[in-house]
Image (cartoon, coloured by chain):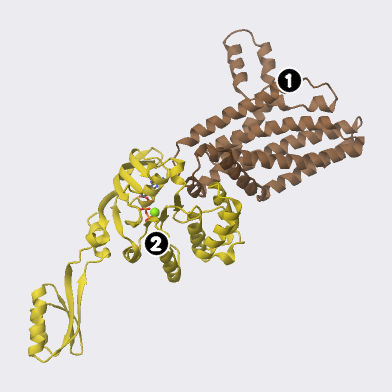
Amino acid sequence: MNPVLSIENVHKSFSTGFIPKKREILKGISFSVAEGEIFGYLGPNGAGKTTTLKSVLGLIFPDEGRIELLGRPHLDPRAKERLGFLPENPYFYDYLTAREFLDFYGQLFGIPKSARDERIARLLKLVGMDRSSGLPLRKFSRGMLQRVGLAQALINDPAFVILDEPLGGLDPLGRKEIRDIILNLRREGKTVLFTSHILQDIEMICDRVAIIVGGRILSQGKLTDLVSEKVLFTEVTVSGVELEELAALGESLTVQADRVLLKVVEEDKVQDILTLVQKNNGRIHSLIPRTQTLEDLFVDMVKPQ
Amino acid sequence: MTVKIVKVIALNTFKEAVRDRILYLLLFFAAVSILFARVLALLTVGDRAKIIKDVGLASISLFGALMAILIGTGLVYKEIEKRTIFTLISKPIRRPEFLLGKFFGLVLTLFVMLLAMSLIFLALVFVHTWTIEWTMLVAILFIFLELVLITAVAVLFSCFSTPILSSLFALSFYLIGHFSWSLETFIKKARPGATKILLQVLYAILPDLENFNLKTEVVHGLPLSAAHLLYSAAYGIVYAAFILALAVLIFRRRDFV
Ligand SMILES: Nc1ncnc2c1ncn2[C@@H]1O[C@H](COP(=O)(O)OP(=O)(O)OP(=O)(O)O)[C@@H](O)[C@H]1O
Ligand SMILES: [Mg+2]
């Protein structure tokens, strides 16, 4: 199966300053997004996520590299027929009402009037903005704009949706709503690429991720492959055992009344603790194996830079 | 290139322009200026209707040009500055379609504004002469052609510089365009040589907006030469097309950041 988006060795520099000085922002980006998946593109502030997306959309022209979108060269309008895009910090025509705004984009896709009206009503409802449809966009809050922006991205019933920080500026309930919309898109067979800082969101809904740091992709793949299932350490809470006896087996993190929270790294030491507790007629209150999270991975990658 | 997309963008641009207050401010001053002709006419001896026509047409031309410049120079720049162009470019449209849409949207706006100004003007002339003077419409049609050209220039500057700078450039274009004909006298007087050739080249490059000025002819009832009208119309259209092509060329490969 052909990828929905493939980016190969994309380089981009910007010249800034009075005496132009070149700064390479993208230093050879390559990754691809497969059909039907939710792909997370993550990286710290200023890593080059938005710059990558702008290259894909033809807003900026890469100095080098190839981009293919929905099986066509990425600048081909026919590829964009089936694409939806939500920019970060959406800015829209503030003199239009939400309905006029969506209608304008619907017209650009040549959707006939009756189908357009029906779709606009459905999308406004989907993003929870049906009550504000007659309000000019200049009176919208940031989160409301974000929602209308998402409706705009879906106006052409796209096969592939690119969302630049779709969860930014939303309240917790709104974040869940948008996450559900994204999951629903996958259920409808659509492909989604989105960027986010919020790792829990990525962890919760993405199939695959790419991590970009300083203009380079440091890691990409299935979330389950990147974040190893390997147990990093085990947290055990016990009581009824002398602290000194436990000290050799693990690092005691907190002591409350007679309860001790231990961080145990080696797995056979966990067994030793269990035997020790049995021998002393003590009790195990909890035993939690900690696996690696995306955050651990992310922090590991970003730190050395 | 599809006409349909250009049309959709043009209509949206029209919506943007007519929701801009500055347009109505200019329209108001244009109306004041046209009606002021009536006051001037009362104060002067001579043919009052002629003064009203003269001042009225001049007002329409000047305020039309101001509308074209003040709105046109912001059109493209604002889209980039406010980043509304991000979502637009992500849709299946080509950059030239965007630019032409903006251009025709403003042309449509100016057409409607010109219509409004003409109504006021013709009504004023009517109460003085009790006839509807259709030749006035010919003069106004050529003012419209001039505005089309100025719009193209405003859009061109708007592609790469700020509205204030663009306005200055476009205003200079307007002024130079109305005085470049005086070069002709210089050329006639100049002795053959480098200076003369230089002046001739300059004259060829500089816009000659007086081509669109039919005031003298219509006010004094002089015959209009079909050849001149045809030449002026072709001049305006070719010049505007050339400016737009230049704008497309500049706009085609630029980064929106
Ligand atoms: N027009 C520009 N001129 C110069 N530098 C730029 C330009 N646009 C972006 N940059 C630089 O490129 C780098 C990457 O920017 P980009 O917006 O792609 O980051 P990002 O990963 O989207 O960050 P964030 O998570 O904050 O949105 C930044 O260091 C930024 O300063
Ligand atoms: Mg960004």
Of marks 2 and 1, the one in the foreground: 2
Chain brown in the figure, letter: B
Instruction: Using the image, name the chain to which the residue with label 1 belongs.
Output: B
**Would you say A89 lies left or right of A236 here?**
right
The 10 Å Cα crowd at callout 2, few under 14, some 14 to 19, many 20 or more, is few
**Residue A101 in the image, given as x and y percentages of width and height:** 57, 54
Chain yellow in the figure, letter: A
Q: Tell me whether the residue at label 2 lies in contact with that at label 1, contact meaning CB atoms closer than 8 angstroms.
A: no
**Would you say A277 lies left or right of A255 here?**
left
**Residue B171 in the image, given as x and y percentages of width and height:** 63, 34
Residue type at tag 2? Arg
Q: Is residue A206 above or below residue B32?
A: below
Residue type at tag 1? His
Q: Is residue B137 above or below residue B98?
A: above
Q: Quadrant of residue B104?
A: top right
Q: Report the disc number at residue A259.
A: none
Query: What residue is at 63 percent from the left and 36 percent from the top?
Result: B151
**Would you say B142 lies left or right of A48 here?**
right
Instruction: Using the image, name the chain to which the residue with label 2 belongs.
Output: A
Tell which of B119 and A206 is nearer to you: A206
**Residue A160 in the image, given as x and y percentages of width and height:** 41, 52
Q: Quadrant of ligand 2?
A: bottom left
Query: What residue is at 36 percent from the left and 52 percent from the top?
Result: A49
Residue of label 1: B228
**Tags 2 and 1 on a common chain:** no
Q: Is residue A65 above or below residue A94?
A: above
**Would you say A266 lies left or right of B208 here?**
left
Query: What residue is at 35 percent from the left and 61 percent from the top?
Result: A197
